[in-house]
Image: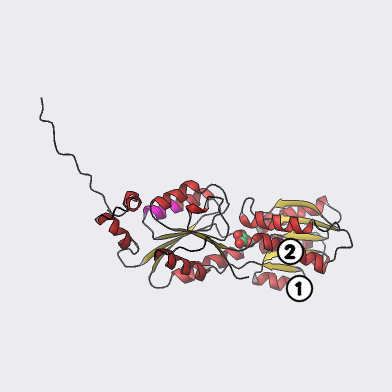
Amino acid sequence: GAEQSTSTKVELRDDPVKSSSDYASGSGNAMSQGTKDNDSDSSGKVKIGFVQTANESGWRAAHTQSMKDIFSQDGYSYKFIDGQGEQSVQIAGIEELINDGYDAIILAPIVEDGWDDVLKKAQAAGIPVIIVDRKVSSDSSLYSCWVGSDFETEGKNAAKWLADNIGTSEQKNIVVLEGTTGSSAQLGRTEGFNSEISKYSSYSILASESGDFDKSKGKELMKKYLGQFDKIDVIVSQNDNMAYGVIEAIEEAGKNASDYTIVSFDGEAEAFKQMIAGKISVDIECNPLQGPTVEKLVKKLLNGETVDKEQFMEE
Ligand code: GZL
């Protein structure tokens, strides 16, 4: 019969260090030494990719700028990916960074659930992932660390401020505008606020629905609340952008924002102007300037160091 070919066809790779098996094996062969070279692309720069939620708020814009400022310094090749408010877009962005052999991936997850598969892919490719701002519900073994704020404490602080400054003797009705459902900021602020305010029988929460951290959705929700309830004393808005929508809804109804106690979160410059105008009563700080903290962690991780799983921002 026909001469059986004895040689097997050797498949040439386009880029020998891109294959995940090179990292997973760690066999010490020439290929896995490529991991060291992989810490910098041909231009000798460290490749950093940042997958952001979207641009839904002033807080988010400051967060994005903080990362851009730090990673546009010399020595980094920085790629920003806008998640456009969709988890599927964020996941596709992470996969793109994995395929392009980035040295580290920074992810600001829009919601907590649904990240296991893509985090496993990054891990298999030997690429450290730093979770920033909101958290993921994935097991912490699937990412290097998380940097962000203590959202539950923020919620508790809002309730404590009410008890201390508005008092606990007269009956007060509260309506809440929650952030994006399933995001750590929404989950934590809601849990923290509810657990603390429930200590005071003089406060009752009439409604607590999502305005998605968005100004126009917050305005529509506040208009609905104004139509539903004839006595609202306190309005808790889980970010400043929704609080601006609340103020517009109140004023378009011919009422005064200063007749209400409006509690907001984030602490944007514009919100300070609204506080000076007496329209927002208190604003719970949430620090978006995470770039410098994240850069220090990237350097440690790429240097083979381990870091604490949770890194809280100064607030
Ligand atoms: C909080 C962050 C929230 C902000 C909102 O750390 O996740 O997302 O409070 C933003 O302004 O949309």
Residue 163 in the figure: left or right of residue 89:
right
Of residue 227 and residue 169, the one placed in the foreground of this image is 169
Q: Quadrant of residue 270?
A: bottom right
Q: Which mark is residue 235?
A: none
Q: Secondary structure at mark 1?
A: loop
Region of the chain picked out in magenta, as a range: 94-99
Q: Is residue 10 magenta?
A: no
Please state which amino acid type lies under the numbered disc 2: Ala
Residue 16 in the figure: left or right of residue 277:
left
Looking at the rendered image, the disc whose residue lies closer to the viewer, 1 or 2, is 2
Please state which amino acid type lies under the numbered disc 1: Ala
Where, quadrant-wise, is the C terminus in this rendering?
A: bottom right
On the image, the x and y values in percent for residue 292 come to 50, 71
Q: Is residue 103 visible?
A: yes
Q: Is residue 249 visible?
A: no
Please identify the dominant SS of the magenta region. helix
Within the displayed image, which quadrant is ligand 1 positioned in? bottom right
Q: Is residue 98 magenta?
A: yes
Residue 172 in the figure: left or right of residue 239:
right
Kindly identify which residue carries mark 1: 277
Q: Which mark is residue 158?
A: 2
Labels 1 and 2 touching (C-beta < 8 A): no
On the image, the x and y values in percent for residue 290 come to 54, 67
Question: Could you tell me how far apart the alpha carbons at marks 1 and 2 are, in whole angstroms?
Answer: 20 Å
Report the residue at 71% width, 58% height from top: 192
Q: Height in image: 219 above or below 4?
A: below
